[in-house]
Image (tube, grey):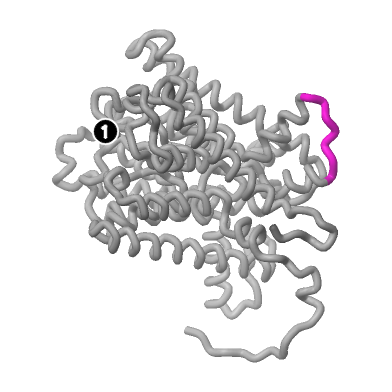
């Protein structure tokens, strides 16, 4: 384990180890015989895959959740989703606060890294606000879902389904309990139900805009001009992706293969298919019926994901915003990107480029390996790897049939996608505090 000069484990390393511990605990619990309906032990690979998918709020599964796992197994999965979605460190700090323990500077420092806060000051108040807001949104979501689920499934089962799907949607996990009649059916049975579709969509977006945007909304209401630059960029990019994606999927669902959908069903399907890749993993239509451009559009939305410091995955809307602004600045021969009356730092541009390139290498490299190992179509392989590395959970149905080596590749992609590329690099590579003290001679090269 690499350590700083003063022998202190870096926050990035604590986050990496925290998720490994969470996945390991989940794997052991899911291997217990009473976690499965058959009463038999789940294999270590299947349990590891499911625990990783839940802890990394992905939603890719080896077996249908409600058909394979007992209520105990489902509770374990839901706890992994909640802890993984809010962050291992956030939950640990929360229990420390409840117990009355003093939160030292080291713990605040780790918490700042965990939620991507701009500074340590006020981090405990921000943590409490995040947890209270998350609990409120999940409770409201569960109450709305129960209007449909209780009449359909009965009181206790309906309440359990409401809570499970509300938490899964808010944490952008994509696990569902709807496969009793048709395994892996997700929310297809509710494709024409506006209450279910709009509630799930709202929960997904709420979890995906990021904790800092919540704070700005609380402190400044609808006064957009007073928001932080990060919140402004996140909301602006989100609006662009939503409007552009919705326009595309309206066209997609006007194609002949979707003639069985009514006009209102097409509107709901287009809205849901725009939002669910960001990065929830539910689906209300058969994804294999999408055209290849439609599947490619879904891949692109999955890779972008949500905001930094949110329950969503992907290389993040913040990263996309910085890259686009950097491109505009280059075309306009400006020294640095500018937006909303502010100038972006070279550090932000460099990190955005590094994150984007890392995700492309993982996404493309993983897809090529799956295609080669299991002889599946390249587009299908790329769909599965983009879903894994962006922690989405949407699938074209290939994941359960893959080889053990391909499953291990997806597990690694889910883990890296959840902890984040920079966190992984900062945790593994020793950072030299004197890096900037000595610089090599500068020489320009021509690009483009």
Q: Position of residue 345 (x, y in %)?
A: 69, 67
Q: Residue at x 80, y 73 (%)?
A: 434
| Residue assigned mark 1 | 265
- Please state which of residues 364 and 65 is positioned toward the viewer in this rendering: 65
| Residue 237 in view, yes or no | no
| Neighbour tally class for label 1: few under 14, some 14-19, many 20 plus, Cα within 10 Å | some
- Please state which of residues 207 and 373 is positioned toward the viewer in this rendering: 373
> Is disc 1 placed on a helix, strand or loop?
helix
- Please state which of residues 310 and 371 is positioned toward the viewer in this rendering: 371
Above-or-below relation of 266 to 352: above
Q: Position of residue 23 (x, y in %)?
A: 54, 40
Q: Position of residue 409 (x, y in %)?
A: 41, 55
Quadrant of the rendering where the N terminus is positioned: bottom right
Q: Which residues are magenta?
A: 99-105
Left or right: where 65 falls relative to 54: left
Left or right: where 417 falls relative to 438: left
Q: Position of residue 251 (x, y in %)?
A: 26, 49
Q: Residue at x 56, y 35 (%)?
A: 25
| Residue 417 in view, yes or no | yes
In this view, which residue lies farthest toward the top?
155
């Amino acid at each position: 384990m690499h350590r700083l000069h003063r022998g202190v484990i870096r926050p990035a390393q604590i986050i990496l180890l925290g998720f490994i511990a969470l996945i390991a605990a989940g794997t052991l619990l899911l291997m217990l015989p009473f976690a499965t309906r058959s009463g038999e032990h789940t294999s270590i690979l299947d349990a590891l895959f499911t625990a990783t998918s839940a802890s990394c709020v992905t939603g890719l599964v080896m077996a249908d959740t409600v058909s394979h796992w007992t209520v105990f197994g489902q509770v374990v999965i839901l706890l992994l989703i909640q802890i993984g979605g809010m962050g291992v460190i956030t939950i640990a700090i929360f229990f420390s606060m409840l117990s009355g323990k003093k939160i030292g500077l080291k713990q605040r420092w780790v918490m700042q890294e965990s939620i991507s806060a701009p500074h340590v000051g006020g981090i405990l108040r921000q943590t409490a606000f995040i947890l209270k807001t998350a609990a409120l949104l999940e409770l409201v979501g569960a109450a709305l879902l129960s209007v449909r689920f209780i009449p359909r499934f009965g009181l206790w089962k309906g309440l359990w389904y409401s809570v499970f799907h509300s938490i899964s949607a808010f944490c952008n996990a994509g696990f569902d309990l709807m496969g009793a009649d048709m395994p892996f059916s997700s929310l297809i049975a509710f494709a024409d139900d506006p209450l279910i579709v709009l509630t799930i969509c709202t929960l997904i977006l709420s979890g995906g805009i990021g904790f800092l945007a919540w704070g700005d909304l609380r402190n400044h209401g609808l006064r957009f001009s007073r928001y932080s630059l990060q919140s402004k960029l996140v909301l602006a990019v989100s609006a662009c992706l939503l409007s552009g994606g919705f326009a595309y999927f309206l066209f997609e669902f006007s194609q002949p293969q979707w003639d069985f959908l009514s006009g209102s069903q097409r509107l709901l399907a287009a809205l849901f298919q725009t939002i669910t890749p960001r990065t929830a993993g539910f689906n209300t239509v058969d994804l294999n019926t999408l055209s290849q451009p439609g599947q490619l559009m879904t891949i692109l939305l999955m890779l972008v994901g949500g905001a930094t410091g949110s329950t969503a995955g992907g290389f993040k809307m913040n990263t996309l915003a910085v890259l686009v602004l950097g491109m505009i600045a280059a075309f306009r021969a400006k020294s640095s990107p500018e937006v909303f009356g502010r100038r972006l730092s070279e550090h932000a541009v460099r990190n955005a480029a590094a994150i984007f390139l890392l995700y492309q290498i993982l996404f493309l490299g993983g897809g090529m390996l799956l295609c080669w190992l299991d002889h599946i179509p390249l587009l299908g392989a790329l769909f599965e790897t983009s879903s894994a590395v962006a922690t989405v959970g949407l699938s074209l149905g290939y994941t359960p049939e893959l080889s053990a080596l391909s499953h291990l590749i997806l597990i690694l992609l889910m883990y890296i996608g959840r902890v984040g590329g920079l966190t992984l690099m900062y945790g593994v590579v020793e950072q030299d505090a004197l890096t900037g003290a000595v610089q090599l001679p500068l020489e320009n090269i021509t690009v483009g």
